[in-house]
Amino acid sequence: PSNLNVSGSSMTLKSIMSRRFALLAIIVSGTIFVFWLLILAEEAL
């Protein structure tokens, strides 16, 4: 039972970390996309 508890908490931690990582990746890619659009706009002007 103690082993089960440890694996359960580690699974929860893993899912939380993966969610945070996914959110971070979305934010970073969004920021890069916005900067890319700004650079394109500057070049177009």
Image (cartoon, rainbow, N blue to C red):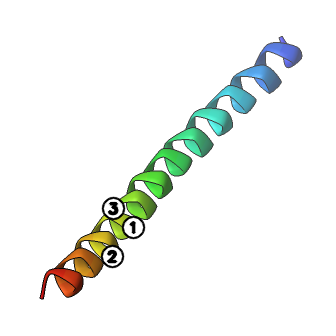
Secondary element at tag 3: helix
The reply to whether dot 2 and dot 1 touch (C-beta < 8 Å) is yes
Compute the Cα span from label 2 to label 3. 9 Å
Which residue in the structure is indicated by mark 2? 35
Q: Is residue 16 left or right of residue 3?
A: left
Instruction: Kindly report which numbered mark, 2 or 3, lies closer to the viewer in this rendering.
Output: 2
Secondary element at tag 1: helix
What amino acid is at disc 2? Phe
Which residue in the structure is indicated by mark 3? 30
What amino acid is at disc 3? Gly
Residue sitting at 48 percent across and 53 percent down? 25
Q: Is residue 41 left or right of residue 14?
A: left
Secondary element at tag 2: helix
Please tell me how crowded label 2 is: few (under 14), some (14-19), or many (20+) other residues with Cα within 10 Å.
Answer: few
The reply to whether dot 3 and dot 1 touch (C-beta < 8 Å) is yes
34, above or below 23, in the image: below
Q: Nearer the viewer, residue 38 or 13?
A: 38
Q: Quadrant of residue 4?
A: top right
Compute the Cα span from label 2 to label 1. 5 Å
Compute the Cα span from label 3 to label 1. 5 Å
Q: Name the disc covering residue 32, or none.
A: 1
